[in-house]
C-alpha cells in the first residue's frame, strides 16, 4: 500500500509519460478512526446524553474532514503527440490544473524545502513550475526526475509523426 501513496510513473511509452499520486494511507487511517467512533457510538447509544451525541457527531465530522483533506490526488501527463505537459490536482483546496509546451521545458528539478522534503518541478523561460502542490519525504523524486529527463530527451530528439 505504501507504493500506491507515492507520486509514481503509471505509464511510460514513446508518446506519453504519466505520473500519478493517489494517497491511501492517511485517508485510510482517518476513515478507520471514524468507523471506530461510529461503531462505539452504536454500541453505547442507549447510554449517551445529548452532549455526548453532539461530541460524537463532531468527532465523526472532523475525522471525515481529515480523511477528505488528506486525499489530494495529482496527475501529470507528458504528451509528445500534443507537444505539452499537463498537470491536474484534485481535492482540497480545490482543483488545480495547468499546462506547458514541451519545448519550453529547459530543466527538470527536484526542489527541497527547509525540512528536507522534496517535490518535482520544471524550469521554463517563464519560471519554475512545480508539478505537485506538496513537498514529500517519501516520493522517489530523483528516480522520477531521471525518468522525465530520459523521456523528454527521447521525445525532443525524435518527436512522433503527426
Image (cartoon, helix red, strand yellow):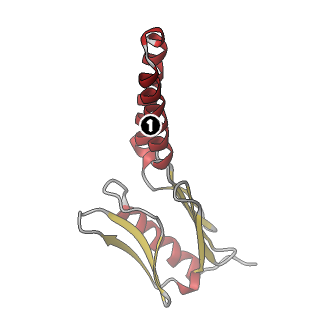
Residue at 69 percent across and 75 percent down: it is: 82
In the figure, is residue 77 to the left or right of 137? right
Report which residue position mark 1 lands on. Answer: 63
Q: Nearer the viewer, residue 47 or 87?
A: 47
Residue extending furthest bottom?
125
Q: Quadrant of residue 103?
A: bottom right
In the figure, is residue 122 to the left or right of 111? right
Q: Quadrant of residue 1?
A: top left
Image quarter where the C terminus lies is bottom right
Residue extending furthest front?
50
Whole-percent x and y of residue 119? 38, 66
Residue at 60 percent across and 75 percent down: it is: 99
Residue at 58 percent across and 80 percent down: it is: 102
Provide the secondary structure element on which disc 1 rests. helix
Whole-percent x and y of residue 148? 47, 69
Q: Nearer the viewer, residue 91 or 112?
A: 91
Q: Nearer the viewer, residue 135 or 54?
A: 54
Q: Quadrant of residue 26?
A: top left
Whole-percent x and y of residue 38? 48, 22
Amino acid at each position: 500500500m505504501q507504493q500506491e501513496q507515492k507520486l509514481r510513473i503509471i505509464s511510460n511509452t514513446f508518446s506519453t509519460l504519466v505520473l500519478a499520486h493517489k494517497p491511501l494511507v492517511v485517508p485510510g487511517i482517518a476513515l478507520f478512526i471514524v468507523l471506530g467512533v461510529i461503531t462505539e457510538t452504536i454500541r453505547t447509544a442507549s447510554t449517551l446524553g445529548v452532549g455526548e451525541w453532539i461530541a460524537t457527531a463532531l468527532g465523526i465530522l472532523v475525522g471525515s474532514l481529515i480523511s477528505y483533506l488528506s486525499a489530494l490526488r495529482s496527475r501529470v501527463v507528458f504528451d509528445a503527440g500534443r507537444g505539452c505537459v499537463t498537470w491536474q490536482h484534485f481535492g482540497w483546496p480545490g482543483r488545480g490544473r495547468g499546462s506547458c509546451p514541451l519545448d519550453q521545458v529547459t530543466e527538470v528539478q527536484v526542489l527541497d524545502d527547509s525540512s528536507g522534503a522534496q517535490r518535482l518541478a520544471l524550469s521554463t523561460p517563464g519560471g519554475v513550475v512545480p508539478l505537485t502542490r506538496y513537498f514529500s519525504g517519501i516520493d522517489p523524486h530523483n528516480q522520477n526526475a531521471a525518468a522525465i529527463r530520459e523521456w523528454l530527451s527521447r521525445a525532443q530528439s525524435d518527436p512522433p509523426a503527426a
